Amino acid sequence: MQTYLPFPDFKQCAAALDTNRLGKQRAEVLQILRTLVIPEFGRLGHPAIRMWMGHVPALTLYGLAMVDEWESRGNPDKLRADITEFAPQAAHPDYAAKIPMPHWLGEPDLHLSHRSKLIQKDARFYGEAFPGTPAGLEYIWPEPAMDLIPEDPEEDFLWVVRSDQTGNVPEKIRTVGLPAVGKPAARSEAADVETPEEAPPVRKEPQRLVKKPTARRKRQEEIFRTLPGKTPVLVPLEDGRTLALGKVVGRPITLDDGRFGRNFELSQVLDRSDLSNPALLQDPRIFFPVPDPAL
């Protein structure tokens, strides 16, 4: 986990990287952005994440510089939209110029340490790019001005339910349920066939373990099961591009596959951009709260 900063200028940083590391930087940036914004997502104690605390727009700008350079080298990209969602202003030059930068950006020793580390990783490529750079320097890890820990809203929020049985037509949603934790392996046909005496015995297939729910999953299931009737929920559709806003109604029910679920009553269909912070929908959890878009 790292953001390479051999220079204070993000575009210059991107241009200096070899293509392999440049491509990986896009994914690294997205991982750090999600950790900084989405509760319970990643390792907040990692120094490469801590240094960007309080500077999500600046990190987004850095990430977009990596994407721009990556595409300029003729490579396809699928991460620009996800990165931009964390700070859309970073994609507009008039607004990007006003984004506050971290206090450590421009500190000579920090950028020197990154150049030195890059030479250690690939002396042939970076030795020529950074002549006169001392060898063997360790990373300088700046500390944030304050610890900023992403937390779920406790008031004025809606539950997001990643139901796996809704399809993409909001008006047809009648029930919602949390995705299955895991399914038992299908029964082997060999178990139902008699083995002739002269044939070698059929080797018994090893028993496959059924995935068990984690403590976090059990908490999510219990909250979902006990939601009061008429509780508003959001159901992402079309990979989260639209959301069905409605209410769970009545008591928990048993779905066709044996899982428990809730009856659902549609109120309206929202666009992803209707949320105050659409990037929160990049949360991998199956059941989590987001701020109410009506507030």
Image (tube, rainbow, N blue to C red):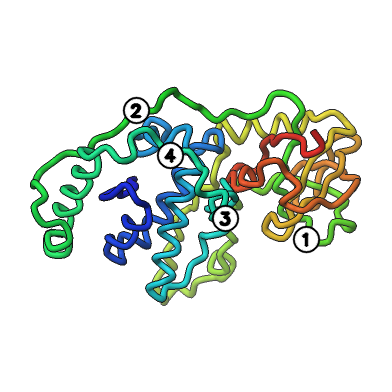
Q: Which residue is mark 1?
A: 167
The image quadrant where one finds the N terminus is: top left
Image position, residue 241 (x, y; %):
71, 57
- Residue at disc 2, secondary structure: loop
Give the alpha-carbon distance from disc 4 to disc 1, as whole Å.
43 Å
Residue pointed to by mark 2: 143
Q: Is residue 212 above or below residue 74?
A: above
Q: Earlier in the sequence, mark 2 or mark 4?
A: 4
Q: Nearer the viewer, residue 294 or 205?
A: 294
* Label 2, label 1: how far apart the Cα atoms are: 45 Å
Neighbour tally class for label 2: few under 14, some 14-19, many 20 plus, Cα within 10 Å:
some
Q: State the residue position of label 3.
A: 92
Cα distance in 3D space between marks 3 and 1:
35 Å
Counting residues from the N terminus, which is met first, the one under dot 2 or under dot 1? 2
**Left or right position of 40 against 101:** right
- Residue type, label 3: His
Question: Looking at numbered disc 4 in the image, what kind of residue is underneath it?
Answer: Met
